[in-house]
Amino acid sequence: MKTQPLDGAFGAQVLDVNLADAADEAFAKDLRELLLRERLLVFRGQHLDARSLRDVGRCLGTLDVHPFIESVEGVPEVVAIVKEAEEKRNFGGAWHSEVSFYEQPAMGTMLYAVETPDEGGDTLLADGVRAYDALPEETKARIANLKAIHSAAHVYGEGGYYQDRATGAAAGTKTRDMEAAQGRVAHPIVRTHPETGEKILYVNLAFTVGIEGMADDQARPFLNELIRHATDEAFVTRLRWEPGTLAMWDNRSTQHNALNDYTGQRREMLRVVIEGDRPI
Ligand SMILES: [Fe+2]
């Protein structure tokens, strides 16, 4: 696969692949190797629908069926992420890695742009490997054996940010099973990549809510500092979408933030999430 680096801190654009007819075993192997190296891959000018996106997604593993978001009819692995022109709130509009509140968070995500605003709606992605590497040695020592608490209760749970979506109050991305979002899970703050062995700073603004064994008044400021560092501009790539853009990222070593700066314009994306394993 021919690639060129993206503008920004990390990631590559793949230049010579038509994904709609690429999904075979040899491609899957090359794709995984490239994704492990770059952590973020972008393919422009693609022609996918829910079914072909699912087939491309399967090149990386088993696809997740999201517990709180309704899927595209007939293709349970694919979710449509839609923001209607009249909606104010967007989906994924805070730094996060996908479902880090799971015991086994996602391995990766593929997002395909169907309809995009003329301007705005970019996605920011941050490289957790570089963020870890750039930490001062004393911070690395301090967090080496700490675990952080992850939860989606404040986002998907009762009274949470997306709750009205479940009742049909908004027309866009639909969420369901709000009760199931109340769990809490502990993951290492320094995660070791299961395939590359790299160390990753694994905390995020949306779902990391505390540090195991540490009082909140102590944990919160420290977490805020780590989270701010993790998304420092030095580790960030800004991804501009156009219809036909497919992006995929390694969800273990990156986090992302969907910017909400296109009020009055519609945006429609299709998403698949690949199942991952328990962070170590
Ligand atoms: Fe996301």
Image: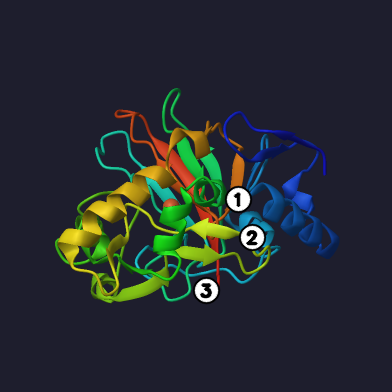
Disc marking residue 280: 3
- SS of the residue at dot 3? loop
Residue drawn 73% across and 48% down? 19
Quadrant in the picture for residue 222: bottom left
- In the rendered view, does 77 fall on the left or right side of 145? right
Q: Which of pointers 2 and 3 lies earlier in the amino acid sequence? A: 2
User: Looking at the image, is mark 1 or mark 3 nearer the viewer?
Assistant: 3
Amino acid type at image mark 3: Ile
Amino acid type at image mark 1: Asp
Identify the image's colour scheme: rainbow, by chain, secondary structure or one colour: rainbow
Disc marking residue 57: 2
Quadrant in the picture for residue 143: bottom left
Q: Which of pointers 1 and 3 lies earlier in the amino acid sequence? A: 1
Amino acid type at image mark 2: Gly
How crowded pointer 1 is (Cα within 10 Å; few <14, some 14-19, many 20+) is rated as: some
**Is there a contact, CB below 8 Å, between mark 1 and mark 3?**
no
Residue 108 visible in rendering: yes
Nearer to the camera, 132 or 138: 138
Residue drawn 30% across and 28% down? 264
Mark 1: C-beta under 8 Å from nearest atom of ligand 1: no
Residue 161 against residue 70 in the figure, above or below: above
- SS of the residue at dot 1? loop
- In the rendered view, does 85 fall on the left or right side of 163? right
Residue identifier under label 1: 49
Residue 172 visible in rendering: no
Residue 6 against residue 140 in the figure, above or below: above
How crowded pointer 2 is (Cα within 10 Å; few <14, some 14-19, many 20+) is rated as: many
**Residue 220 rendering spot, x and y as whole percentages:** 22, 57
Nearer to the camera, 133 or 171: 133
User: Looking at the image, is mark 2 or mark 3 nearer the viewer?
Assistant: 3
